[in-house]
Image: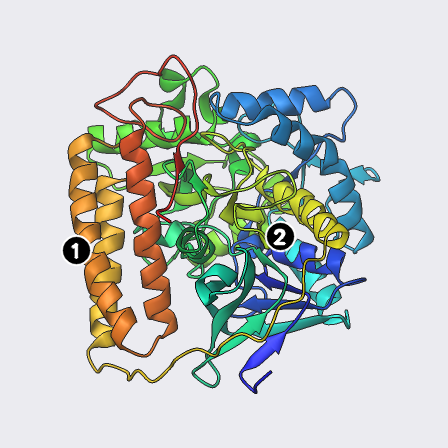
Amino acid sequence: MSATSHSFDVLIVGSGLAGLSAALHLAPTQRVAVLTKRQLGDGSSGWAQGGIAAVLAEGDSFDAHVDDTLVAGAGLSDPAATRFVVEHAPQSIAWLRELGVPFSEEDGHLHLTREGGHSARRIVHVTDATGAAVQQALIGHVRRTPNITLFENHTLVDLISSDRLGLPGKRCVGLYALDEATDEVLTFSAPQTILATGGAGKVYLYTTNPDTATGDGIAAAWRAGCRVQNMEFIQFHPTCLYHPHAKSFLISEAVRGEGGRLLLPDSKGGTRFMPQHDARAELAPRDVVARAIDFEMKKHGLDCVLLDISHQPLEFILAHFPNIYARCLELGIDISKQPIPVVPAAHYTCGGVRTDLAGRTDLPGLYAVGEVACTGLHGANRLASNSLVECMVFARATAQAIAQAPGPAVPPLPNWDDSRVTDADETVVISHNWDELRRFMWDYVGIVRTNKRLERAAHRIALLQSEIQEFYGLFHVTRDLLELRNLVQVAELIVRSAQARHESRGLHFSRDYPTLATSALPTILVPLP
């Protein structure tokens, strides 16, 4: 192997809960590389506020959790995948407790909160900063585990499959990654690769996701020949803080779970509107609440609506939402005395790379875990707090599958051809295209869609793809260019999936097809050979 090449047993792309969990499960028997395009804790997992759903309370049951998930999924959740996750969820919570995650307790027992769509209290949490606490614990363990090698500031360029190298068979044998420290594309080889790259929220103008959520794994798997599923189902979180100095700050669903009320900012001092849209009011699933807010904002010409938890005592707010309280107070909003201005924002990619119950994709040797994957759990709408547990359950299942079938040895792979030069105009072109993409995706492929809007989006995407592919083919790659290339590819998959669904179901609402179809079928896109 040359100085620009690395060889491992397993490559993991992404350092969120899915990637780090898989690494820890694999480390006892495999040499593991974890690549992440920024720092270990910069993904979406660390931003999760609410918690992790698991059946732990007396009176709750696996059947109830399964039913709640299927209801939220609007007929498209896979029953086998749903039961698989639900029944393994308590094991995942126990594992995190063994790793030292300090879950909130009350009277010596785990404190369980309730969120929209759940019929019982089953959300395990660390106050209102669950993801950060979990990531902190995992990162500590990963850094101390000798069989795990970390590659921070390494951006996935593309996967390497044997058939495209003229080797026999067709399987994933490694990847190319850009090392930002040296500005060099490195070659990584391994018989097994796990994509744990997260979702694609940054394809939209307003999102609760960090800047890393650019759909890298979905786009790379599609280019490598993997099917993607249900990409039209983008979950918009109903309540993102609306403030000029707050970027992507989520107001947890648990605020509504603990009695928060949505109000119009009107002369009456705040009129509650959710009971007019759904009998479950503020505890309705996210798609219902997001559409209701979108409707009221457009109806009244509003920039935002209000979320009010001020009827709860200050002690209660400080105990349950200390981070939300502190952040809002920094911005001049005392949530114990006044409501919080909120807007919907792109939050979660329910679709993704199609996998089985062991995380396997269509390409042998390639797995996908977490938000990058479509396991069938979320269907047309993810139930609150089902995402983190999905990461852990499938990380363990994938690690077990790899341990049982390690894969054949990989021959030396060719190095990246980097004779290309950097173009002086690249930065401004990328910035302009990025901004254009996110704005028209928000306007045309957002919470409410029409055939005409989707056609406009598809036309603009085709123009951008042509321009970006020219840059990619001629000039030296940068992280910004790679992320934009992936976002435009994911945008195309979202639009194509939305155009293929001639109904309104879950997170996909079309004015041209406002009713449910008689049968619920997933949207599966197949790449050209």
Identify the residue at image location x=29%, y=70%: 472
Frontmost of labels 2 and 1 is 1
Local crowd size for mark 1, using a 10 Å CA cut-off: few (<14), some (14–19), many (≥20): few
Does residue 64 appear in this view? yes
Q: Secondary structure at mark 1?
A: helix
Name the residue type under label 2: Ala
Identify the residue at image location x=69%, y=60%: 23
* The N terminus - image quarter: bottom right
As drawn, 117 above or below 37: above
In this picture, residue 281 sits left or right of residue 46: left
Q: Nearer the viewer, residue 476 or 37?
A: 476
Which residue is denoted by mark 2 in the rendering? 18
Q: Position of residue 353 (x, y in %)?
A: 48, 45
In this picture, residue 280 sits left or right of residue 432: right
Identify the residue at image location x=56%, y=87%: 3
Q: Position of residue 290 (x, y in %)?
A: 37, 32
As drawn, 225 above or below 158: above
